[in-house]
């Protein structure tokens, strides 16, 4: 395999059709990659929690709370979870905080509403949402920031997070894979089983310049419904820890990187919004 193949974004890399009927957008001119949200956030939303049943959301929520208690505003109780998905983190955070969830997927929010009666859930884009409230904590987890297309969009999104923080508030962002840690050619297979679903998920990864491209294949078996096969391509923006910290700083956040994150090897970006009262 020559260097030209690994360094060139081609139509074929982004135009593989989905058996679920989802759209995958791409642009042939120039280097910009335009990708819609993967179908696991839309057509496969009903399987999302089962496909991620290894995550310990309670433990992760406790870890996030401990960071906020150590770094954040004393007495802060307003929490915004951006890209909240089906609301699994909010399920635990709502017990202590006045929580709001935001996501772009109506299918994911539909599940979250069933799980979180009484919790405000907003359908919006993380780059452009505007809420009247200001929050003590803004989180964006599970590498969701990697679904943005360019470094400029990440900077715009960090600006938006900072805009919605009260002075002294904390932004906690779980980054996508660091470029130095991404391993093209890796194959990963995971299985999950419950009385209502047997799922096999297989992934193969490649890299095109500053984007990871993960080819996902799913076998989903349900009693009485048979076995369904789906495939998708998930494109992620690869930015280094230094680049992400610089973008947080430009957004008016005092950034730091915590090597102990929610999952092994990923870490957390933490940014505190400047508080003139505490500085004086």
Image (cartoon, grey):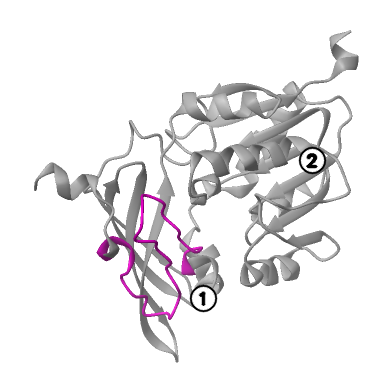
Determine the main secondary structure of the stretch shown in magenta.
loop
Image coordinates of residue 252 in percent, x first then y, are 71, 25
Image coordinates of residue 135 in percent, x first then y, are 83, 39
Residue picked out by circle 2: 164
Look at the image and give the residue range highlighted in magenta. 12-39
**Position of residue 78 in the picture relative to residue 89 (left or right):** right
**Count of numbered marks:** 2
On residue 43, the disc is: 1
30 inside magenta stretch: yes
Instruction: Name the outermost residue toward the bottom.
Output: 224
Looking at the image, is mark 1 or mark 2 nearer the viewer?
A: 2
**Position of residue 229 in the picture relative to residue 164 (left or right):** left
Quadrant of the image occupied by residue 7: top left
77 inside magenta stretch: no
On residue 102, the disc is: none
**Position of residue 136 in the picture relative to residue 215 (left or right):** right
Disc 2 residue crowd, few under 14, some 14–19, many 20+, Cα 10 Å: many
Residue at 45% across, 60% down: 35
Say which label, 1 or 2, has the lower sequence index: 1
Q: Are marks 1 and 2 in contact (CB under 8 Å)?
A: no
Which sits in the foreground, 175 or 49? 175
């Amino acid at each position: 395999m020559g260097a030209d193949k690994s360094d060139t974004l081609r139509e074929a890399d982004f135009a593989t059709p989905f058996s679920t009927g989802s759209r995958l957008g791409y642009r042939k001119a120039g280097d910009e990659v335009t990708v819609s949200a993967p179908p696991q956030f839309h057509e496969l939303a009903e399987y999302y929690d089962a496909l991620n049943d290894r995550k310990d959301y309670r433990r992760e929520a406790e870890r996030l709370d401990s960071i906020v208690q150590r770094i954040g505003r004393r007495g802060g109780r307003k929490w915004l979870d951006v890209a909240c998905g089906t609301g699994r983190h909010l399920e635990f955070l709502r017990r202590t905080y006045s929580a709001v969830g935001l996501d772009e997927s109506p299918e994911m929010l539909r599940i979250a509403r069933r799980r979180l009666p009484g919790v405000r859930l907003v359908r919006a884009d993380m780059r452009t949402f505007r809420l009247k409230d200001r929050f003590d904590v803004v989180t964006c987890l599970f590498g969701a920031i990697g679904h943005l297309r360019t470094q400029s969009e990440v900077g715009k999104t960090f600006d938006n997070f900072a805009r919605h923080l009260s002075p002294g508030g904390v932004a906690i962002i779980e980054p996508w894979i660091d470029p130095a840690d991404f391993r093209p050619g890796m194959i990963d297979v995971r299985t999950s089983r419950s009385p209502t679903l047997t799922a096999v998920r297989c992934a193969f990864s490649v890299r095109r310049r500053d984007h990871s491209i993960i080819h996902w294949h799913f076998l989903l078996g349900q009693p009485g419904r048979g076995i369904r096969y789906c495939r998708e391509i998930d494109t992620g923006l690869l930015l280094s820890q230094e680049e992400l910290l610089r973008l947080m700083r430009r957004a008016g956040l005092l950034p730091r990187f915590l090597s102990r994150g929610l999952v092994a090897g990923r870490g957390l970006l933490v940014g505190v919004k400047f508080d003139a009262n505490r500085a004086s």
